[in-house]
Image (cartoon, helix red, strand yellow):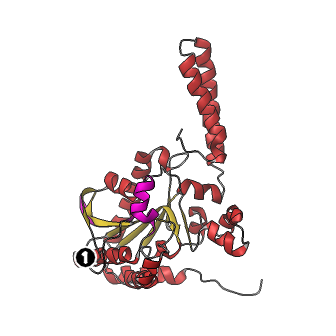
Amino acid sequence: MSPVAFEFEKPIVELEQQIEQLKTERRDDENAWIEIKRLEEELAERKFQIYSNLTPWQRVQLARHLERPHALDYIRRLFSNWTEISGDRHFGDDKAIVTGFGHFMGKPVAIVGQQKGKDTKENLERHFGMPHPEGYRKAMRLMRLAEKFHLPVIILIDTPGAYPGIGSEERSVSEAIARNIMEMSVIKTPIVCCVIGEGGSGGALGVGVGDVVLMLENAWYCVISPEGCAAILWRDRAMAPEAAAALKMTAKDLMELEVANEIIPEPLGGAHRNPEEAAHNVRHALAKHLERLRRKRIPDLLEERWRKYRRLGVFIEGEA
């Protein structure tokens, strides 16, 4: 069991601790192994019951798990010959977004990833995964290079939102996000976006316009965080679980709303429990969609991309 556990995972933690204690203290007792087997069966059943019936808020918590794989973890597992490029050629380099080139299943691709830290020191360096405007401009620089050399772009989204500090505002973060949304809509190369954790607000959408949007099973993607929504609507951040349910931010909800194109399954309990399996599932989904998108003519690709985003939020009013 991961050392970081949430309240809803406590029954699992208790059973795992009982099993570990029996294995340590009574490993030579045959009767103990009968009890261990019974507890392991109960543990498997309890895990299935809990993780198969997660609430939206519980999925948000799993998306934020400190040990959940981040963009660079997937990059190291999925791509070979990874070569990072830095800087936006205007102001500086934003560590919250990593960009570069690599090979995916033997073919060259361009990669953009929103990167969180593993600990406090790295989170401070990465701005807790919240990009500054130079991060979005760096991402666009890479995408224009990808367009020039006819390379597909793979984007790994994982941010609670764009950085809200004074410097970020002074350098026009809203303009950088808006420009990326505009330019990504017409970039003449396939774009596959994959939400691997949090997809918060314009911070995610600034690199989130693509031909395909994939979501890991416990990821979320929304215009605002549950806490932010609760603070606005109820003036109480403790209402975040209710906000998470109302916002329709989970992968299942977004598939129904046709925002996401596919849900990528995670290991039972979350991607942090088996990062290798999670990466394998992401690889399979990326390979399937890239193969399909590579076969499309660019005019058809752009037309379908335009129609995909024009359909979002459309509804028809009429008599019941």
- When the figure is inspected, residue 136 is found, relative to residue 65, above or below; the finding is below
Residue 20 visible somewhere in the drawing: yes
Q: Position of residue 179 (x, y in %)?
A: 40, 85
Q: Residues within 10 Å of mark 1 (few under 14, many from 20)?
A: few
The amino acid sitting under disc 1 is Leu
Which quarter of the rendering shows the N terminus?
top right
Which residue lies at the image location 65% right of the left edge and 41% below the top edge?
A: 10
Q: Position of residue 309 (x, y in %)?
A: 49, 81
Which quarter of the rendering shows the C terminus?
bottom right
Pick whichever, 171 or 81, lies toward us: 171
Which residue lies at the image location 31% right of the left edge and 67% below the top edge?
A: 99
Q: Is residue 246 left or right of residue 202?
A: right
The magenta-colored residue range is: 106-130
Q: Position of residue 115 (x, y in %)?
A: 40, 62
Secondary structure at numbered mark 1: helix
Q: Is residue 236 left or right of residue 286?
A: right
Residue 70 visible somewhere in the drawing: no
- When the figure is inspected, residue 269 is found, relative to residue 107, above or below; the finding is above
Pick whichever, 268 or 238, lies toward us: 238
Question: Disc 1 marks which residue?
Answer: 145
Which residue lies at the image location 44% right of the left edge and 73% below the top edge?
A: 208
Pick whichever, 41 or 246, lies toward us: 246
Q: Position of residue 147 (x, y in %)?
A: 27, 78
Q: Is residue 270 left or right of residue 184?
A: right
Looking at this rendering, what residue extends furthest in the bottom direction?
318
Q: How many marks?
A: 1
Question: Is residue 287 covered in magenta?
Answer: no
Q: Which quarter of the figure has residue 154?
A: bottom left
